[in-house]
Amino acid sequence: MEYQSTRSNYTLDSKSAVLAGIAPDGGLFVHPDIGSLGFDASLAVTLPTLKIMEYVISTLLPDFKDIPSLVSQAFEGKFETPDLTPLVKAGDNYVLELFRGPTSAFKDVALSLLPVLIRHAGAKDTVTVLTATSGDTGKAALEGFHDVPGTRIVVFYPHGGVSEIQKAQMVTQQGSNVHVCAVRGNFDNCQTGVKKAFADLASRGLSSANSINIGRLVPQIVYYFSAYRDLIARGVITFGDKVDFVVPTGNFGDILAGYYALLLGLPVGRLVCASNENKILDDFLKTGVYDKRRPFFRTDSPSMDILVSSNLERLLFLAGGKTTVKVRQWMESLGRDGIFRVDDETLRAISDVFVSGHATREMTAEAIRMAWEKAGYLCDPHTAVAWHVAQQYKTESKTGNPVVILSTASPYKFPQAVLGALGRDTAGVGEFEMMRILNAITGVPVPKNLASLEGRPARFDTVIDIGEITPYVESVLNG
Ligand SMILES: *Cc1c(COP(=O)(O)O)cnc(C)c1O
């Protein structure tokens, strides 16, 4: 099957697209006609989750062999429940819990599969995966790639820029092919340094675990089907009824997977894009103007603190008439002037499906408190942004469709923000102690993978300057 770049007629088969990650022209790999692949959505919603996974992968990444075996290697026994992503009822909302994987982050769904795909994509030499992380991606990638034959992984995180728990998750990582390194600077500096390393060391077999990789997007489509299946099982809907999904959004990967589910035939009503104070996507979806010339806010939902949402480019291609010329112009304009505006036709096509909202820091804290007090549901701050936007959406839209909120992290990864929202003073309290306090007041169990980090010895303590990233990667490559 041919994947093409969003910016030119460059094409690759699905295996090579997974290995390459990004096209040489800077575009992302897309299949131009997902609706024509013969996928039967009414069949998919009768299957167990791992069978849906096999069906979606064999449809979208058909060049891989032995897909059932790949799926079992990736997921068997790694998640808290065999259906990976349980749907729970909380008040009058349904919450799709995506954080029941090995690192308590929704990134686990995709990063459990990607290493297996890379290993079986047929690279001749060892593939070295470089990742800059603001916290969650790094650990999920380490957990996915550790001890996978034919791969190595190097993670860079900002020194002093991640939470105590996130740091403990990374520096205690086991495995003989993993490297973790702190960088003096912020996340953007790390990312710039890593991009430079890619350029400096091109042709040395480097790859990325970033969410632009089509191999990361594909497994995320599955939980839209499993949520729909679970709503049928609960007697809430029958096949054909529309369901709306509210998605806490950063790089636009999670919500784009919902659009792919729709293109594959799932009766999706609206996809509601929820932003924090960095509400560039909310503004774009309302006006058609994407303008990154604005202040950047550090919020309590750091995985959504993003001003350039890479995966939006795929939507621009698919909804914008599939013309690479337009996408290239928009992306050039963004790079040159920090802004682009889509034409009315494209905006209309996008607005048929996507709506949006945002939550400030105060609204997020209020949502954590309301969800707990009124619905008995403990949200992390990312999920709380979506919870707030869902309440607003339900009042305004009146579609009457069932609403599913995607929940992207365990509240125990962000105990300070959650305890603060519940009115507790956390000054001078360590994060592991905060986890115990949160557990004592709510009774919600602490995920084992997080509780067991306390007191575990660190394996990595290297701290480098930004300019030392390329030499560090070289030493790993030569080591
Ligand atoms: C990555 C992440 C998001 C954003 O998902 P995108 O696919 O980047 O839009 C939201 N919440 C959490 C906890 C995340 O880790």
Image (cartoon, grey):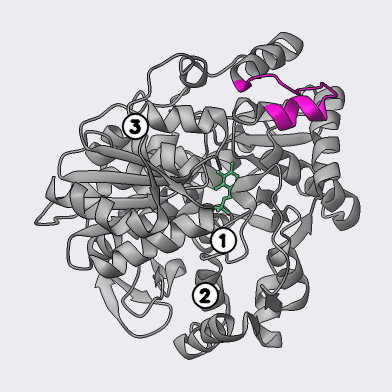
| Pointer 3 residue | 460
Q: Callout 1, which amino acid?
A: Tyr
Residue 318's tag is 2
Determine whether label 3 and label 1 are within 8 Å by CB: no
Determine whether label 1 and label 2 are within 8 Å by CB: yes
Q: CA distance from mark 3 to mark 1?
A: 40 Å
Q: Is residue 299 above or below residue 263?
A: above
For residue 437, what is the image quadrant? top right
Number of numbered labels in the structure image: 3
Q: Is residue 14 above or below residue 291?
A: above
Q: Residues within 10 Å of mark 1 (few under 14, many from 20)?
A: many
**Residue sitting at the far left:** 124
Residue 440 position, x and y percent, is: 71, 9
Q: Callout 2, which amino acid?
A: Leu
Can the viewer see residue 434 in this picture? yes
| Pointer 1 residue | 259
Residue 426 position, x and y percent, is: 75, 23
Q: Which residues are magenta?
A: 416-431
Q: Is residue 458 above or below residue 278?
A: above
What's the residue at 76%, 69% (across, down)? 283
Sequence-first tag of 1 and 2: 1
Q: Residues within 10 Å of mark 3 (few under 14, many from 20)?
A: some
Q: CA distance from mark 1 to mark 2?
A: 10 Å
Would residue 119 be found to the left or right of residue 252 on screen? left
Would residue 362 be found to the left or right of residue 21 on screen? right
Q: CA distance from mark 3 to mark 2?
A: 43 Å
